Image (cartoon, rainbow, N blue to C red):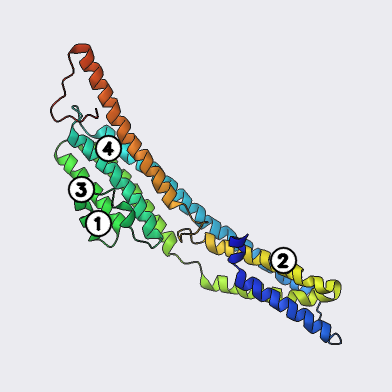
Amino acid sequence: MKYVLGKIKTELTLVIVFCISFQMFHYFFETIAINIPIAIPTIIGTIISLLLAFKSNQAYDRWWEARIIWGSIVNDSRTLLRQIIIFYDDPDFSVQANDFKEKFAKRQAAWCYSLGQSLREKDPIKPIKDLLDEDELRFVKKHKHVPNAILLLHAKDLKKALNTNKINVYQQVEIDNTLSRLCDAMGKCERIKNTIFPTTYSMYIRFALCLFIILLPFGLINNIGWLQIPLVTTIAVAFFLIEKMAIHLQDPFENRPTDTPVSAISNTIEKNLMQMVNEYRDEFEEEYYSYQTANQPIKPLKNTYFVL
């Protein structure tokens, strides 16, 4: 409640002061008629309800679209690493191949973290320092758009694997399509971030809401007297909270509790990708040891990676 009411503390204070001042004026100047028909604020309240409902729906659509986009990022990140692990030609399970796949996994996790930080207008380099090597960090620091630079590193490694015959042309096309979907998701997030909700629409709703709250005590003063103070305050709090909720939902990348949890999603992606790399490595280790035990004494292969 402290967090919720803290978002409208200014409006709440002004409403309470207004209601008390209105009641005091009516008490000391009782002979002055200051009441109006309750139907007038009722009509205005009905109009405001419709406007707030429309605004809330539009804001929720933006928030839900952002969540759908990040859900696709989760799926495409897993798809990308699965393609790298399966397509990369590595019959001997070499150290070079393992490093290539592990680097791809860390770089994709870094892309997710940097994209989330960029959307929140924070430093995109800070959370990825442990996921990229020194050369990659120097490369991305030269670019203003860090997530786009990381995708470029993906593409360069993909081309290198194609030139060394580690993957074929058809596999390269499939992986590149996955990178294109990730780039498309990045652009959609930036569109939501950079598209401002019409300011005039919000301003008109706020004007109508203030008019409704100002007129409401005039219609209640003769019926409930002093009780109009808590009643009007409660009604005002409800309307202001709905308005504030719509404002928060319409910007899902502002680092608020109501935002899309991009950091938590990125953390989940990192865990999934690293687990995929480790399981692939463990599977080949087990097959190699089983084969050696059945045929001859275990003798490590040259340039082969094992965790003993």
Q: Is residue 6 left or right of residue 179?
A: right
Location of mark 4 (residue) = 84
Q: CA distance from mark 4 to mark 2?
A: 58 Å
- Decide which of tag 3 and tag 4 comes sooner along the chain: 4
- Decide which of tag 3 and tag 2 comes sooner along the chain: 3
Q: Nearer the viewer, residue 44 or 231?
A: 231
Contact flag, marks 4 and 1 (Cβ < 8 Å):
no
Q: Is residue 81 above or below residue 13?
A: above
Q: Going 28% across and 52% down the picture, which residue do you hit? A: 129
- Please state which amino acid type lies under the numbered disc 2: Thr
Determine the secondary structure under disc 4.
Answer: helix
- Decide which of tag 1 and tag 3 comes sooner along the chain: 1
Q: Is residue 292 above or below residue 110?
A: above
Q: Quadrant of the N terminus?
A: bottom right
Q: Nearer the viewer, residue 1 or 263?
A: 1
Determine the secondary structure under disc 2.
Answer: helix
Q: Position of residue 110 (x, y in %)?
A: 32, 49
Contact flag, marks 1 and 2 (Cβ < 8 Å):
no
Q: Going 81% across and 73% down the picture, which residue do you hit? A: 226
| Mark number displayed over residue 234 | 2
Q: Quadrant of the C terminus?
A: top left
- Decide which of tag 4 and tag 1 comes sooner along the chain: 4
- Please state which amino acid type lies under the numbered disc 4: Ile
Determine the secondary structure under disc 3.
Answer: helix
Q: Going 38% across and 63% down the picture, which residue do you hit? A: 121
Q: Quadrant of residue 210?
A: bottom right
Location of mark 3 (residue) = 156
Q: CA distance from mark 3 to mark 2?
A: 60 Å
Location of mark 1 (residue) = 140
